Image (cartoon, rainbow, N blue to C red):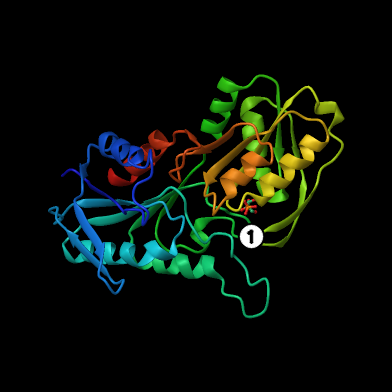
Amino acid sequence: MMPLIFQLPEASGTPPGGEGLLSSLCAGLSGERGVLSLRHFPDGETYLRVESTVDGRDVVILASLHEPDGKILPLIFLARNLRELGARRIGLAAPYLAYMRQDRRFQPGEAVSSRYFAELLSQYFDWLVTVDPHLHRIHSLGEIYTIPTSVIHAATAVARWLKAHLEKFVLVGPDEESRQWVEDVARRCGAPFMVLVKERKGDLDVAISVPDVDVWREFTPVLIDDIISSAQTMTTVVKALLSQGMSPPVCVGVHGIFAAQAYDQLRQAGAGQIVTCNTVPHVSNAIDLADDVVVEIKKILTT
Ligand code: R5P
């Protein structure tokens, strides 16, 4: 039976390009697009109705989990409803997986949200596919998720994009946490790289030490990070590299969340091109991971 594929709508409506991944999944998985009515009552509560025939079918819910708090309840209601309507298995394709950074109790009394979020999703889904989750102190999703999980790595697609669009470049990782992505992309491109040292003093306050980059002056700097959220990290590095006479850095993020005015701030700081993968719909999406997502889901659906 054809899998049924739903997309959880964004609260702000579908942004440009946001339909692309859904269409690719439907085509690549020979799936049927699920029909769903989701709206809010005047008091803010969620109304949800599944209009497709679900009984006995594999179901995939595509939901990129940036701005997760407004999505989690409709997502759980949808999964719970699909279960009652007889779905065979219910999978979550979350190209961006939220709550991966609060993975430890840094201060007494803090919630370890990564674990709680994982426990919640594991109750309602049979499997999870995602792209480069922020694994740092947690080394694999299996440490916190109790359902089968598959992780897609964007490094191959990022390296392909860089080789096709740039000539002489040096990769720059803003902090130790970015080393895993920067090293991987550098190896695939055969490009040099450096990893800087970052100290985060607050949500919107980061300090980054940049070494003497004189030797790289002829190269285009390419900043690589997994997440661009407030863009403070990238903005700080962009300014530091420009002050050392380097050309406008190309900024590459796997997940371009761009909270509030982050995108404009990064551009105004003097960034060159800003490029992201299509894991979070955004005008900067230039690297398409749809084929990779299809391949991973296919593996699950054929078992
Ligand atoms: C953190 O360790 C991540 O890898 C990113 O560096 C971080 O999330 C970027 O955040 P922001 O854009 O808010 O500086």
Query: Residue 28 location in percent, x, y?
Result: 29, 34
Q: Who's the residue at 48% across and 70% down the image?
A: 116
Q: Secondary structure at mark 1?
A: loop
Q: In the figure, is residue 97 to the left or right of 261?
A: left
Task: Say above or below: 150 vs 275.
Answer: below
Q: Is residue 36 visible?
A: yes
Query: Residue 64 location in percent, x, y?
Result: 41, 51
Task: Tell me where residue 194 sits by quadrant.
Answer: top right
Query: Residue 261 location in percent, x, y?
Result: 57, 51
Which residue in the rendered view is the most extreme toward the bottom?
Answer: 109
Quadrant the N terminus occupies: top left
How packed mark 1 is, by other alpha carbons closer than 10 Å (few <14, some 14-19, many 20 or more), is: few
Q: Nearer the viewer, residue 254 or 204?
A: 204
Q: Who's the residue at 67% across and 45% down the image?
A: 234
In the image, what residue type sits under mark 1? Arg
Q: Nearer the viewer, residue 262 or 110?
A: 262
Query: Residue 276 location in percent, x, y?
Result: 53, 38
Task: Tell me where residue 55 sits by quadrant.
Answer: bottom left
Q: Nearer the viewer, residue 79 or 259?
A: 259
Q: Which residue is mark 1?
A: 137
Task: Say above or below: 102 vs 262.
Answer: below
Task: Say above or below: 56 vs 46.
Answer: above
